[in-house]
Amino acid sequence: MVIGSLYIFLLFSLLVIVILGSKDKVERYIQLILITFIFIDFSIPPGALGIKLFDALTIFILPFFFISKYSRSIKISGKIKFILLLFVIILVISSINSINPKLSLLRLLQQLNYLFFFIIFTSYVSLKNNLIKIKPTIVISFLSCVIFLTFQIVFGLDFTLYSILNSNVTNQGIRYPGPFQDPQKFAQFLGMTAFLFFSISFKRKFIQKKYLYAGILVAISIISTGSRGALFGFVIGISYFIIRQTIKTKKIINVILISIIALVTVFLSENSLVFKRMDDTESDLQFRYSIWIKAYDIFLEKPITGIGTGTYQGFVEENDPDQFWKVNDEKIYYNHPESGFLLWLVEYGFFGFVIILGAIIYLVNPFYRKKMKWKNENSIFLLEAGVISWIIGFITVDSLGDKRIGVTLLILCSFLYLSKFNLTSKNLKFGHRLCRNKNLK
C-alpha cells in the first residue's frame, strides 16, 4: 500500500483538471485539499526535493484566488504588511547565505504556502454559509485518519502509506502512526482534531452530540500512538477549557470529564504503552537536552538571520556528523533538534522566531477580550485549547514539516481568528479587530 511519487503526480494532475473545470475554483481547491487530506504531505517528482501535493495545489490556485471575489474581501493592515515583508526579507537573506541556497529557498516557499492557505481559507470561510458547507467535509476528512488507524491496528503496521516508518514506531511496543510516518506527529494531529470537533459541536443553545462523540473518539485514539507529549498537551488543553468555560449547564463538562477519566484510566493501566514509556522519561529528557544544547550552539553562530529554512539536516551533516539515526544500516541525520520551537530559532534566527511566536500569542491570548461580546465563548476556549495542545507537543517534536499538521493547525487558527475577533467578509481585515460575526454563531 506504499504511495509512490508517480501516483501523487497523477493525483495532482487529476485535481488540477477538476479545479479548472469548476466554476468556483477556490472553493474546489479547499474541498480537494480536505478530500485528499491523507495524501497532501507526499511529494511529486523528483523525490525528496520535489514539492509536496499541498504546495503544488496552493501555488497553482494563487492566480485564481487573486482574481476571485474572495481576494477582494481582504484588507491587510499596514503593520501586518510591514511585519510580513520584514519576515520574508530576513528568511530570504538567511536562505541565500545558507549552505544550500537552492534547497533553502524551496523550503521557504513551502513554508510561505502555509500563509497563503491561511489567507485563502479564512477568506473563504468568512463568507456567509461557507462554514456550514465546509464543516462536514472537515469532519469526514479528519475522521478518515482514525478509520485508517483502526485498519492499521487490525492488520498491523504493514497497513501503511510509507515504505519506511519512523524508528520510534516499535519503541517498547507498537506505537501506531496511522496514515502518518511518525506516531508523535499523528498524536498531535489527533489532539488538535479532538478540540476542533468539541468546538464545532457547540451551538448557542444546544450541543451537536455527533461532533462531541467524534471528538471523544479521536481523543481516545491518542493512546494508540504512545505519545506522552501529545497526551500531556491534550490534558493541559482540557484543563485550560475547564478553567475558562462559563457554560451554565454542566452536561457537556460531565461528558468531557468522563472522557478524561477514561484516558487517565488507560494511561495508568499496566498495559498502556504510554505508562511503560514513563520509565524512560528521564533518559529521554537527557537525550533531548544534549541535542538542545548543540542546537543552541548552532543558533549562536547565526543568531540574527539563522542558518536558513530547511537546512538543519545539511548543517548537522557537515558540522556535527555525530547527530544521526541508523535505519536499516543507513545514516539519517537529524532534520530537527527534537524541538519545533528550537528549530525555528536555529533556522529563522531571533527576529524570525519572535515574529512567528508573536503571531501565536496574538491568537491565543487568554487575557484579551476588550469590549467583544462573544456569543459562543466555549467554542473559542476550545479552539484556544486545541492550539495550546499543539504547542505542548511542538516543544519536543517539529511537526510542521508534515503538511497535514500545518493544515489542521491553520484551520484551528482560522476559526479562532474569525470567532475571537468577530470578523466577517464585510470587515475581514488582518491586523484589525472589528465587530460581530453573524456567520459563526
Image (cartoon, helix red, strand yellow):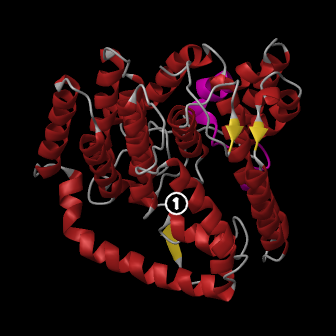
**Vertical arrangement, residue 312 with respect to residue 249, above or below:** below
Provide residue 297's location: percent of width, then percent of height: 57, 87
**Vertical arrangement, residue 26 with respect to residue 159, above or below:** above
**Measuring 28% from the left and 37% from the top, which residue is drawn there?**
245
Identify the magenta region: 30-49
Q: Is residue 251 magenta?
A: no
**Measuring 48% from the left and 44% from the top, which residue is drawn there?**
370
Q: Main secondary structure of the magenta part?
A: helix
**Vertical arrangement, residue 99 with respect to residue 197, above or below:** below
Left or right: where does residue 99 sit relative to residue 361? Answer: right
From the image, which quarter does the N terminus lie in?
top right
Left or right: where does residue 229 sit relative to residue 123? Answer: left
Q: Is residue 33 magenta?
A: yes
Q: Nearer the viewer, residue 348 or 42?
A: 348
Q: Amino acid at mark 1?
A: Asp
Provide residue 260's location: percent of width, then percent of height: 19, 40
